[in-house]
Image: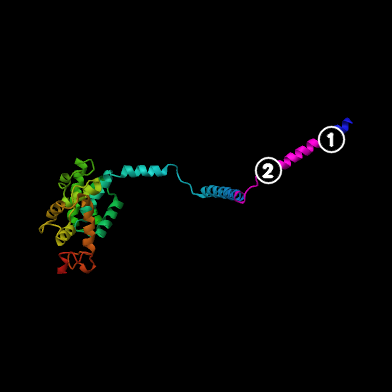
Amino acid sequence: MVTRQLGRAAGEAAAAAAAAGSRAHSTAPIPSKSSRKGKKVNVLYDSLEGGIAEKEETDSKRLKWEPGNWRQQLENIREMRRNKDAPVMRYQVLLSLMLSSQTKDQVTSAAMLRLREHGLTVDNVLQTDDVTLGQLIYPVGFWKNKVKYIKQTTAILKQQYGSDIPSTVKELVNLPGVGPKMAHLVMDIAWNNVTGIGVDTHVHRISNRLKWVKKETKTPEETRVALEDWLPRDLWSEINWLLVGFGQQICLPVTPRCRECLNRHICPAAKRC
């Protein structure tokens, strides 16, 4: 009797549990189609992200070696060299400009290359005899005079400026073979200090042709003063190399190429071409 009662109670409990489970299962929300789709998308994204991460890790292992902090080191070196503060560099700028007077750029460049290969420092130039120095810079214009000027100027730099170059226009023009045009260019290029416009024969000629001077000027120095009177100062550094290149290729001293010039309709001198 007792056994049958216990069996009946167990059966009723199991039935109640089954019924409860059935009701719970029947009342549980059925995932919507969009929800099921969302889960699939998430699984897909997880799979893709895992694949991308694995690929990036593999690619990073394939990259060649590079030293640590090199980018910051390079930037620091750029900052330290920004003002071209090495005396040997400024000396080379000065000599390059001394050689460039009355000389084509290609000839100047070749002479500078030979000088650098020989050793273009104050001490080495002073130890080089005049014949060898002449052979190194030939065929720049007036090369014999420039040998003399280079030797004299280099000796002054050694004795008075600690193998560096002067940092003012006034001191630069006192060096043998250095004129105002050269001095202003040296100040700009070597010292990063724009003190005036570098006016050579090209700048002088073109400024007069374009009537960039109030009245015709006779010398490059007169042209420099006339240009600086009105030309915005932030253009003083750029104007030299612009007009020099323009004068070498289009606005030639003789038979300028006016037909190729974009200024031919507004140039006062174009009518004579």
- Say what secondary structure mark 2 lies in: helix
Q: Is residue 16 magenta?
A: yes
Residue at horizontal 84%, vertical 35%?
Answer: 8
Q: Position of residue 224 (x, y in %)?
A: 15, 53
Indicate whether 84 appears above or below 256.
above
Judged from this view, the residue extending furthest toward the top is 2
Rendered location of residue 271, percent (x, y): 15, 68
Camera-side residue of 136 and 183: 183
Element class at badge 1: helix
| Residue 179 visible in the displayed image | no
199 shown above or below 162: below
Provide the major secondary structure of the magenta segment. Answer: helix
Q: Which mark is residue 201?
A: none
Q: What percent of the width, then of the height, locates residue 15?
A: 78, 39
> Dividing the image into 4 quarters, which one contains the C terminus?
bottom left
33 vs 222, nearest the viewer: 33
Is residue 24 left or right of 224 when viewed as pictured? right
**Figure quadrant of residue 4:** top right
Instruction: Give the number of the disc on residue 8.
Output: 1
Please report the bounds of the magenta region as a residue range: 9-35
Q: Is residue 186 magenta?
A: no
